[in-house]
Image (spheres, rainbow, N blue to C red):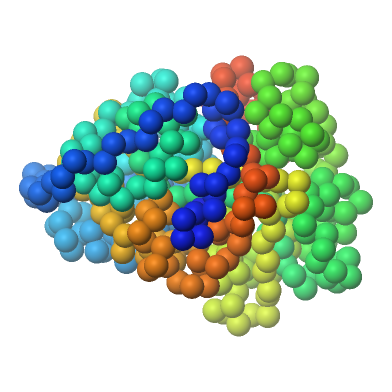
Amino acid sequence: MKSQSAAVVFSLCALVLAACGKGKEQAAPAAAPSAAPAPAAAPASKDLNVYNYSDYIAEDVIPGFEQKTGVKVTYDVYDSDEVVEAKLLAGSTGYDIVVPTLNFFGRQIQAGVFLQLDKSKIPNLANLNPEWMQRIAQQDPGNKFGVPYMSGTTGIGYNIDKVKKAFGTTDVVNSWDLVFKPENIAKLKSCGVTLLDTPSDLIPIALHYLGENPNSTDPAVIDKAAVLLKSIRPYIQNFHSSQLVGALANGNTCLVVAWSGDVIQARDRAEEAKNGVHIGYSIPKEGAPQWFDMLAIPKDAKNIDNAYAFINHLLDPKVAASNTNYIHYANPVPSSVPLVSEEIRNDPTIYPPAEVAAKLFSYSVVPPEVDRQYTRIWTELKTGK
């Protein structure tokens, strides 16, 4: 999940959320190195294999790393946490760095698939936002296995003109009613509706909308989300987690439930193309998910020193700012904020104000039996059964 911020001091850090572990005791943030370590010696191998979401890194970041280190980066992409988790649990991934979302990351730690970090090899850990690290420590105690990459929200992306045509106003985008009331979503069927192809996002959102605990493990409660999602199935054109950026930017879909940065990327692509498509993003008034994506090293990684070097590179303030400027997600390095463009720093969809942030919620680790129920619900939803 990409996406999943700061207004110089990160307004998200002021949240009082049931974050990721729902009430678990917070562990202490990762300790910063006592002194700035000397730069690491040049790695012996010259390869690095990275597995990350599509459209989720600035164009200059990998070339800059390759030029600085002489390491050749192979960068493969996926579009859902379920895909990367399947590879991790199967073993022999072939990757040196993967980027799971925090709730998946938490249960993958329990499965023992990651290398415990040697923090002495990542001196830029000193740059990390301590508030983020405290929240992440709820699922990674002591911050032993992962480093935050980006944070964002999951909300509503929409074609401004087509929503206005259908409803006479865009006020409707401020509520999940637009998505979950059949009489509303039906008005946008003809111009295209796309949902993220990931039950781990949509089922908790549906539960939250129904007034239930989004992280419920009660099968009967979860089935309420299934009923709600099936009620809007006739109006959904597509389920996809990467193609929706281009579809929204090109005007081929007019309503999406998507990760914040993807919608903002679609908006910018449309503006650059001057194609007359105008895109907006909304964090609905009822609240929405806020998530963290994590950098982690699988136990079977072959190029471990290069993985450390790349993670350290990503935590450099200039590199972190370049990523945020390009992909429009909040990064975990507060000292990068002055280097982020003013337009992005002041964008409330990237750095939500306190009153919006207070209504955000986070995901918990899903136990196996709930994961199986999610998968069954999603299969039935997509196939229309």
Q: Residue at x 65, y 64 (%)?
A: 248
Query: Going by the image, does 365 lie left or right of 307?
Result: right
Q: Quadrant of residue 323?
A: bottom left
The image shows residue 272, relative to residue 184, as above or below, that is below
**Relative to the observer, which residue lies in front, 280 or 137?**
137
If the image is split into quadrants, where does the C terminus sit?
Answer: top right
Instruction: Give me the residue at 54% from left, 27% from top.
Output: 21
Identify which residue is drawn at 52% across, 72% down: 343
Compared to residue 247, the image places residue 293 above or below, namely above
Q: Is residue 376 left or right of residue 309?
A: right
Q: Position of residue 354 (x, y in %)?
A: 62, 53
Q: How many marks?
A: 0
Kindly identify the residue that appears in the image at 60 percent across and 39 percent down.
16
Where is residue 152? Give x, y as percent.
Answer: 54, 51
Of 228 and 127, nearer the camera is 127
- Using the image as rendered, state which of residue 290 and residue 245 is in the foreground: 290
Q: Is residue 286 visible?
A: yes
Residue reaching furthest to the right: 183
Q: Position of residue 339 (x, y in %)?
A: 38, 68
| Residue 246 visible in the displayed image | no
Res. 96 image quadrant: top left
Instruction: Locate residue 163 relative to residue 12 in the image: left or right.
Output: right
